[in-house]
Image (cartoon, helix red, strand yellow):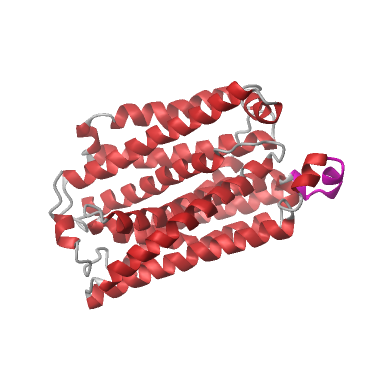
Amino acid sequence: MTMLGWALFAAGLVLTFAAYLVDHRHAAFNNVIGLLLLISVAVGALFLIALEYLTGAVWSVPMRRIVEFIGGLVVLVPLLAIPLFFSLHQVFEWTHVNSVTQDRLLMAKAPYLNEYFFFARFVVFAALWIVFYRLFTRNSLRQDTVQEATFTRRNVRLGALFMPIFAITITFTAVDWIMSIEPHWFSTILGVYYFSGTLLAALGVATYFIITLHENGSLPNLRRDHFYSLGALMFVFTNFWAYIAFSQFMLTWYANLPEETFWFIKRWQNGWEYVSVLLIIVRFAVPYAVLLSQDAKMDPRRLKIMAIWMLVAHVLDLYWLTMPTFSSNVTISWIEISTPMLVAGVIILMVSYKMKRHNLIPVGDPKLKRGWDFHL
């Protein structure tokens, strides 16, 4: 798996660098997709960790360390954002002084949409994610040695503190990196929309690694009941995404406000209507049909395929959210695969690196035995 990670990383890095040389603006938009993908996987993993501690879940304890490894990707988020902070003028209309001074709406939004505040928000959000990741994993790893329930209680309190911070930061991330690409567009539900996709992306990556390790004999005691829980979560959040996506469209259609409808109109012409229909099929119809039955949720092979599917669907979703602003016509080229390929390689390398340094199982967690013995 490490070799695959290095291959994807090297190819993605070369293609991303070449994309910036060939078409800077196109590469920058694609970089936005890669950044949002990395944030989804990394911060979504932190949400899953906090959720386990807060709910007192037992079934996920044997697998939690893998999710912690995935959460380690938060430290790389600022690195992927660096090229974008040198390319803001290529992506965001509100960074152009002439555009702002000639537009009353952009002038009204200037106190929020300005480069200094934009950068400051990103730094604060990334710092918060990294701090919580460090605290969660420090307590979890110490518990491997000390084996005291105190560290679990600490992480429960951290989880309670993290949840509102997660809600705020993931919402403003969606506003900053998606909505502000179209600064005249309004959506009060975009943060929840991005959250639903974030959870599916994080679950997809976690499920893929967990099942791969199980197949390799590293997590041999996992049962079909554990797999069912993973499959059920993917199924639930697939339906949740569909509900939020439909709600956003329905409310826009019903209100019929020009500052909202133009965004959907752009995605229903010049070839983007095919991408819109494809998104419904890939993001909802196929996962819903495949994961509907109980047996499907317990089938490791099927779950592994759907885990990869979820990640690809999230990339398509981010493409649909951002690229119509770049071009009124559908753009499909080698540039589209550059940054997502880079991110895929980074994910594999990070998890592989963590697996070599730490226990794959939180052996000190007092709920571990109950986790192994979990039955529906």
Quadrant in which residue 364 is drawn: bottom left
Quadrant in which residue 257 is drawn: top right
Q: Is residue 102 magenta?
A: yes
Q: Nearer the viewer, residue 150 or 58?
A: 150
Quadrant of the frame with the N terminus: bottom left
Residue 51 appears in the picture as rendered: yes
Residue 24 pos. (x, y %): 71, 48
Q: Is residue 72 left or right of residue 52?
A: right
Give the residues in magenta. 93-103
Q: Residue furthest bottom?
A: 146
Q: Is residue 255 left or right of residue 340?
A: right
Quadrant of the frame with the C terminus: top left
Q: Residue at x 86, y 45 (%)?
A: 101
Quadrant in which residue 286 is drawn: top left
Q: Is residue 209 magenta?
A: no
Q: Give the dominant element type of the magenta stretch: helix, strand or loop.
A: helix
Where 128 sits versus 185, above or below? below
Residue 38 appears in the picture as rendered: no
Residue 112 pos. (x, y %): 71, 52
Q: Residue at x 63, y 29 (%)?
A: 330
Where 296 sits versus 35, above or below? above
**Image label count:** 0
Residue 119 pos. (x, y %): 67, 60
Q: Is residue 178 left or right of residue 65?
A: right
Q: Residue at x 16, y 48 (%)?
A: 223
Q: Residue at x 34, y 37 (%)?
A: 236
Residue 116 pos. (x, y %): 72, 60
Q: Nearer the viewer, residue 354 or 375?
A: 375
